[in-house]
Each structure stands twice: as C-alpha cells, then as structure tokens.
Amino acid sequence: MKTKHFIVSFLVVLCHFSALQAAPQRSRYNFNHDWLLYVGDQAEAKQIKFNDSQWKAVNLPAAFNEDQAFAKDIKDL
C-alpha cells in the first residue's frame, strides 16, 4: 500500500513539474518600418526589377489617405 501511495505521489509531482517547464522563448519581430505605399494599381509592380522610387515611404500603421483626410469639410463629402 505504501508503494502504491509513493508511486501515485511521484507521478503527481512529476506531472506537476513537467507542466511547469518553461515555454520556449518567443521571437518578436518588428515589421512596422520601411514600407512603401502607392495608392492605385500598377500591373508592373509584380516584376522583380520594378522601380518603386516614386512610392511614399511609410511606417506602420499608416493610412493610405492621410494627406487628403481633412482636405474637405465633413458636410462636403
């Protein structure tokens, strides 16, 4: 009976410690910088050697219409 109690206690402790193992360290990536924005559609943009030098450099979060957002009064919309 003592052996059975010892084995059960050992298994409970073992399960408890296995649950407390540290989770693997998560990697965090910041991909909010160095984006380029162009409002519209350019079919050539899928090409590898596409020239995107005229596109606006933005950091995320960014609004595509931030330059025009308050250009008109709300009643004129």
Image (cartoon, rainbow, N blue to C red):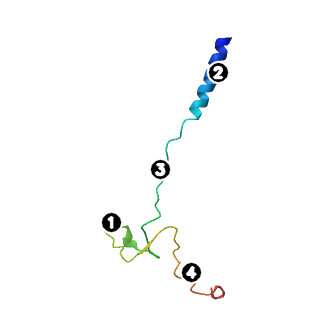
- Picture layout, residue 63 above or below residue 4: below
Q: Is residue 62 left or right of residue 42?
A: right
User: What separation in Å lies between label 2 and label 3 (alpha carbons)?
Assistant: 37 Å
Q: Position of residue 47 (x, y in %)?
A: 34, 67
Residue at figure coordinates x 61%, y 23% from the top left = 11
Badge 2 or badge 3: first in the primary sequence: 2
Name, please, the residue furthest toward the left: 49
Residue at the disc numbered 1: 48
Q: Quadrant of residue 50?
A: bottom left
- Looking at marks 4 and 1 on the same chain, the residue that comes earlier in the sequence is marked by 1
Q: Is residue 22 left or right of residue 46?
A: right
Q: Residue at x 63, y 88 (%)?
A: 76
Q: Quadrant of the C terminus?
A: bottom right
Residue type, numbered disc 2:
Ser
Q: Where 2 falls versus 28 (above or below)?
A: above
Q: Residues within 10 Å of mark 2 (few under 14, many from 20)?
A: few
CA gap between label 3 and label 1 equals: 29 Å
**Disc number for residue 69:** 4
Q: Which residue is mark 3?
A: 27
Residue at the (49%, 44%) spot, across then down: 25
Q: Quadrant of the N terminus?
A: top right
Q: How many marks?
A: 4
Which-is-in-front pick, marks 4 and 3? 3
> 48 above or below 71?
above
Identify residue type, mark 4: Ala
Choose the circle earlier in sequence order: 1 or 2: 2
Q: Nearer the viewer, residue 2 or 46?
A: 2
Q: Marks 4 and 1: CB-CB under 8 Å?
A: no
